[in-house]
Amino acid sequence: MGVLRFDNVSKQYSGGHVALADVSFDVGEGEMLFVTGHSGAGKSTLLKLVHLSERPSRGAVLFAERNLLRVHGRKVALHRRDVGVVFQDHRLLADRTVAENVALPLILRGLRRADIARRVRSALERLGLGERERALPTQLSAGEQQRVGIARAIVGEPRLLVADEPTGNLDPTLSAEIMTLFETLPARGTSVLVASHDLALVRRMRKRVLVLDQGRLVDDIRPEELADE
Ligand SMILES: Nc1ncnc2c1ncn2[C@@H]1O[C@H](COP(=O)(O)OP(=O)(O)OP(=O)(O)O)[C@@H](O)[C@H]1O
């Protein structure tokens, strides 16, 4: 069993708009892949179904051995421990320090203070933010803020990281740095699913690419195929 499976998933929003139509794919344990497509193709919707901020209209999403159709109430929070989420706008709390922002998911889980401090320090160091732990988000550059968002998403060592346009606001050098960091995660037990409409970036990474077009999965390109072009 892989880490994620979409089984004939469709999503129709209440206004009637079909955002995903009959989408099926599997993500293996330790895989890193991209989902791409034009604006409105359904990329964000696909990620939202994984972290349960939306529900499918038809079909099933399986996370490891967990059928997300059956995850409700308190189990939603438990599920989200297994899925780290990175947004384009990083959504940091402006009145909390870098370290406090990163600690938040661990505080919610009720971990011991010493454990939290150790994990936060380690996540910040991996992101090159060891010196910035006492800064407030507004005192950081855009790239640093995005890295804090990533530290917060991986501090709990999730089984899957989903990232929605994580480099959307960043220059090419910072984007490349973030992608290089993402590439290290599978070896540490975190699979990675990145939504991006930046085709140049996606091609450079030479990973598997799911292509959405108006809600349909129209291609599932393997890294070997990209390398041959
Ligand atoms: N809450 C909602 N209610 C109604 N329609 C929605 C909602 N969220 C998204 N949609 C519609 O569903 C379609 C897919 O949206 P989605 O955000 O998944 O696309 P996307 O590929 O992530 O686009 P972008 O690259 O612009 O973020 C779009 O046509 C969008 O307008």
Image: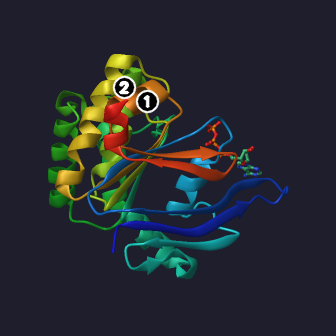
In front of the other: 106 or 165: 165
Q: State yes or no: discs 2 and 1 in contact (Cβ < 8 Å).
A: yes
| Residue in the picture at 22% in, 59% down | 189
Q: Position of residue 11 (x, y in %)?
A: 69, 62
| Residue in the picture at 68% in, 40% down | 40
| Residue in the picture at 21% in, 65% down | 112
CA distance separating discs 2 and 1: 5 Å
For badge 1, the amino acid type reads: Thr
Q: Which mark is residue 167?
A: 1
**Which structural element holds mark 2?**
helix
| Residue in the picture at 58% in, 39% down | 37
Do we see residue 103 in this rendering? no
How would you rate the neighbour count of disc 1 (Cα within 10 Å): few for under 14, some for 14-19, many for 20 or more?
A: many
In front of the other: 71 or 35: 35
Quarter of the image for the C terminus: give it.
Answer: top left
Can you name the residue that lies furthest to the bottom here?
70
Q: Quadrant of residue 139?
A: top left
Location of residue 30 with respect to 78 vertically, above or below: above
In front of the other: 223 or 75: 223
Q: Position of residue 165 (x, y in %)?
A: 49, 36
Residue position for label 2 = 175
Q: Position of residue 41 (x, y in %)?
A: 65, 43
Give the left or right position of residue 115, taking residue 158 as reference: left
Quarter of the image for the N terminus: give it.
Answer: bottom left
Cβ(mark 1) to ligand 1 < 8 Å?
no
Give the left or right position of residue 179, taking residue 16 as reference: left
Of callouts 2 and 1, the N-terminal one:
1
